Amino acid sequence: MAKPIVAIVGRPNVGKSTLFNKLIGQRLSIVEDTPGVTRDRIYAQCEWLNHEFMLVDTGGIEPYSEDVILSQMRRQAEVAIESASVIILVTDVRSGVTATDQEVATMLLKSGKPIILCVNKVDSIGDTPAEVYEFYNLGLGDPIPVSSTHGHGTGDLLDEVLKHLPEGEEEDYGDDVIKVAVIGKPNVGKSSLINKIAGEERVIVSNIAGTTRDAVDTVVENESGKFVFIDTAGIRRKSKVFENIERYSVLRAYMAVDRADVCVIVIDATEGFTEQDSKVAGYAHEQGKGCIVAVNKWDAVEDKTDKTMKEFSDKLRVDFSFMSYVPFLFISALTGQRVNKLYEMIKEVAEKNAIRVTTGSLNDLLAYATARVQPPSDKGRRLKIYYITQASTKPPTFVAFVNRKELFHFSYQRYLENQIRETFDLQGTPIRFIVRERDRNDT
């Protein structure tokens, strides 16, 4: 189920990024008192009253600026508006209604989307300042006074957002279909892989980075099952993302990861692992998706011996140490080498990501693991793990109930995670571990 998108827009320097950070609860967007600092849209999950949506921060809109960066930022905001279900227009109570605010409001009204008017920098508590009422002139309904710095009014703002949010958009595909996002940096062969899978020129293929402009779905059914492959434009490091249409593709790539059950991370065998590959993989890992690393262009690696693949795998294992669970598959999208093996691997990883382990099996494992390696102690007090149960799937999430959380050292938690992964063969999926402390009076 795709989460609805809420876009934060407005002219430069009205506090959009500060509001974005306040709403998502972390400093993700750059905040600086200089117009034009946020040049890329930032994309993050936001939750309010058990409703989840994706929040998009945008660069400031200058409707008539001929400045290259500002005009690109304007296009970025327009693209975010096109994608959004709800739009938050941020204005500044200190400067009042400006001509730019009027132009932006007019542009938003043409979109036909629900628009929520946020009047920012109302930092005082008490009666609404008279200056707020000036913003009725924008014709967008009741303005909501907010202090993005202190958080005043953000609850009212989010309440208003929920009134306009559609229910999560249902996928057209059935529950038996595995959704696969094909992700990676530009020009590693993602589109060529999709074309080989589909058996046709499904998406544009070119050596020019960024030729895949949008996410494209390819439905495949074979003896392994039903799959939907979501092709995306490459996720490129932000300092290299200049063309506005390619910036849009970054957002679509993240959205594809959110939709997917399994992510196939494509890397170029001729280049090896790069820092950008870790960023692409890291986003999929953080979202709890099942993951596979497809090493493409294996046919182009010269002077291979019978040890080349093992040596390459050993190096990748070090590079992907933050995802020790991920399997590797060496393929060639050009020749089709080992592409057929991808289906079974995707199916297995999807099953592991959605696995449900009984509490009885987990506690049998716990008894074995604690007998093999005794839980740690500190100052004469030893960690007791009463039991473990599984709380959720996608990814598998386990809860351990203990006497004292501070005794549950990271190293021992990692040991138990490894025991669970090994026993239940959880290849290809991250797992989450939550530690809960019983009432100390009971211990």
Image: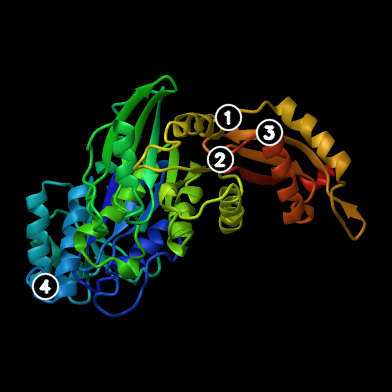
Residue contact at pointers 1 and 2, CB within 8 angstroms: yes
Residue 351 left/right relative to 205: right
Instruction: Report which residue position mark 2 lands on.
Output: 429
Instruction: Report which residue position mark 4 lands on.
Output: 98
Cα distance between the residues tagged 2 and 3: 18 Å
Which residue lies at the image location 24% right of the left edge and 47% below the top edge?
205
Amino acid carrying label 3: it is: Thr
Amino acid carrying label 2: it is: Thr
Front disc: 4 or 2: 2
Residue contact at pointers 4 and 2, CB within 8 angstroms: no
Q: Name the mark on residue 355.
A: 1
Front disc: 4 or 3: 3
* Badge 4: residue crowd in 10 Å (few <14, some 14–19, many ≥20): some
Residue contact at pointers 3 and 1, CB within 8 angstroms: no
Mark earlier in primary sequence (1, 4): 4
Front disc: 3 or 1: 1
Amino acid carrying label 1: it is: Ile
Q: Quadrant of the N terminus?
A: top left
